[in-house]
Amino acid sequence: PVEGNLSMKKIIVASLVVSACCAVQTMADTIAAANTLSAPGLYLGLQLGSASGHSSMVEYDAGATDPDGYTWNGADKAAVSGVYLGANLLTKDKIVMGVEADLGFAHLSDEGLLLDAGAPDSRYLYGWKSGLQGSLRARVGVMAGNALFYLTGGVAMGQQTFKTFEVESDTISENNQRTMAGPTVGAGVEFAISTHVTARIEYRYTDFGNAKITPNISGNDGNYDDKVNVTQQNLMVGVSYRF
């Protein structure tokens, strides 16, 4: 019985030692992974998600300051994908600051009848589609264990195409492409998976601003202008490698 008790004690002590070693190793891994999120340096990532876009148009007679009654609104949802490159520049206590740029593509599009004083005008269709887009942003976050909760904001640019379609003659009068720019803001949370790999989820709202389009319908080029605006919301997941 005495030998049995000694053997049991040895097993218990060995188990405690192994458990303690595992706990220390887990803690060390957690600290190392967390340092990955806060350490200064470059990272490169891929992202994929869903985009929801909205486009609006208000028409003005040439030289006029008041709308002439023609309007249009379009909306669409589609996948968005791209790459991002960033750098942590400064870490103080649990605050992490850096910069990030991204480049991607969102194939959002819609078309429909122009509205004349709120009523559909069967003579004319209007259309919009988005394309290549990117942004340059600052990023500020707070470390919480193995996670980084952050805010981001800066400027975004995107290719937008607008078309006017004359139903009666069955022709597209013009495809007008513009590179539009405006503010973008968002928030996200990033987790360290290993000492080099992180994963995140991010929401971002972008207002690509306004542009002026001068379409040509029935040869009336220059007689009126379209003021267009595009906004977009993205919800994305990303995986990055930290160098």
Image (cartoon, helix red, strand yellow):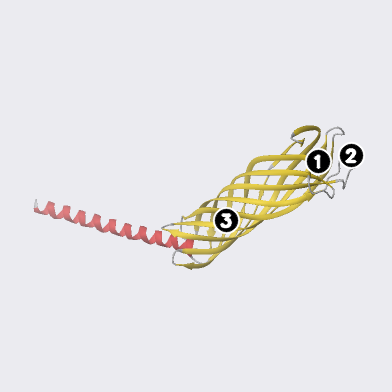
Q: Amino acid at mark 2?
A: Ser
CB within 8 Å, label 2 to label 3: no
Where residue 217 sits: x, y (%)? 86, 40
Numbered label attached to residue 107: none
Q: Viewer-nearest of labels 3 and 1? A: 1
- Residue under label 2: 218
Q: Earlier in the sequence, mark 2 or mark 1?
A: 1
Q: Earlier in the sequence, mark 3 or mark 1?
A: 3
Q: Amino acid at mark 3?
A: Gly
- Residue under label 3: 45
Q: Residues within 10 Å of mark 1 (few under 14, many from 20)?
A: many
CB within 8 Å, label 2 to label 1: no
Is 212 situated left or right of 207 in this image?
right
Rendered view: 147 above or below 107:
below
Q: Earlier in the sequence, mark 2 or mark 3?
A: 3
Quick one: 39 or 212, which is closer to the camera?
Answer: 212
Is 162 situated left or right of 37 in this image?
right
Where residue 6 sits: x, y (%)? 14, 55
The single residue placed furthest to the right in the displayed view is 219
Label 1 residue SS: strand
Q: Residue at x 81, y 38 (%)?
A: 165
Where residue 93 sits: x, y (%)? 44, 67
Is 99 situated left or right of 28 in this image?
right
Q: Amino acid at mark 1?
A: Thr
Answer with the quarter of the image where residue 59 lies.
top right
How far apart marks 2 and 3 lie (CA) works out to 48 Å
- Residue under label 1: 164
